[in-house]
Image: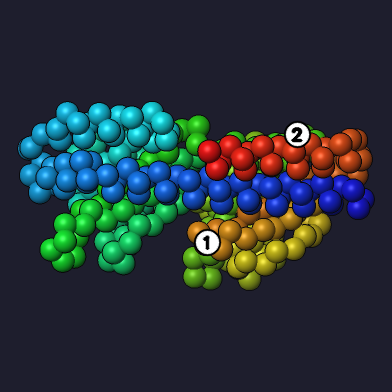
Amino acid sequence: ERDGWSRLEASADLRRDELASAIGAFRREALGTLERPIVHDALLRVARDPGSELGEQARHELALARERFGFGGVQIVDATGRVVWQTGEPLFAPRSATKLVERALALREDLLGDPVGSRLVLAAPLEDGRGMPDHAVLFQGRGDCITRKLLAGWPGMGASNRAYLVRQEGEHAVILAGGDAANVQGFAIGQRLPLASTHATIPAMAATRIESRAEVLDVRGQPTWAVTRSLPEIGWGLVATESRADGMTGLGATWGLLLLLDLGLVLFVIGLV
């Protein structure tokens, strides 16, 4: 049993670290692209006059950034949520994007939005040096974004191993991404669970930055192990789960743990490149 818990905790730690690294890289790459004078000035010009041309050089820079950094789409969005210009994939989840833009403009800082499926999205105010900005630039990750890859099953773990992301919103925990294909947790993406609900004990722990572990029953009544981890820099929590049956098998426990650690080291080094 100890080996099973150690293996699940190791997978949770590595998922958390790699998610933080990947999301940090996504933010740096998006802001670095926007801060390039050629790109920034061209986007600002189009925001002021949607009928104007972006310019060949700025278009080329954005195309390179999309290819190199995996941006699925880039949009200029005004304070009402209207898309005044875009390149690449169209805007997903316009309603949540509008709220994200409103918050980013009000706070005058870049903000990471809730994952749209497995896509990351970042809103950055388009500053013009004349006061409060009234447009933001949205960067969307591709459909095969890192969140899906890191929340799926991992080498060395049982077939039931999965993970999902949550965040706190008032007195609720909101399910953001991930889960189990068989949905043995009984949660749905976007579901809001009262923090005080006994049904939501595990996601509530993760959403409120409590790092722990517990055994609970899934919707089928089967014992399931869960480990919670916090990503405080972005306000999310992570839950890694595995059935107790898989955790107790002990198949390759030591080798699986070593493989996870090696994989985490490789991914961390790649993230630094």
* Residue 110 drawn at (x, y percent): 35, 57
Q: Nearer the viewer, residue 77 or 173?
A: 77
* Residue 210 drawn at (x, y percent): 67, 67
Q: Residue at x 35, y 46 (%)?
A: 32
Q: Amino acid at mark 2?
A: Pro
* Residue 104 drawn at (x, y percent): 31, 60
Residue with the mark numbered 1: 233
Q: Quadrant of residue 156?
A: top right
Q: Disc count in the image?
A: 2
**The disc label shown at residue 183, or none:** none
Residue with the mark numbered 2: 155
Q: Nearer the viewer, residue 24 or 199?
A: 24
Q: Amino acid at mark 1?
A: Glu
Q: Nearer the viewer, residue 214 or 107?
A: 107
How far is disc 2 from disc 1 in space, using C-alphas? 27 Å
How packed mark 2 is, by other alpha carbons closer than 10 Å (few <14, some 14-19, many 20 or more), is some
Whether residue 89 is visible, yes or no, is no
Q: Residue at x 70, y 52 (%)?
A: 13
Q: Residue at x 16, y 41 (%)?
A: 42
* Residue 195 drawn at (x, y percent): 60, 68
Q: Quadrant of residue 199?
A: bottom right
Label 1 sits on a secondary structure element that is: loop
Label 2 sits on a secondary structure element that is: loop
Taking the image as shown, residue 186 lies to the left or right of residue 67, namely right
**Lower sequence index among marks 2 and 1:** 2
Whether residue 112 is visible, yes or no, is yes
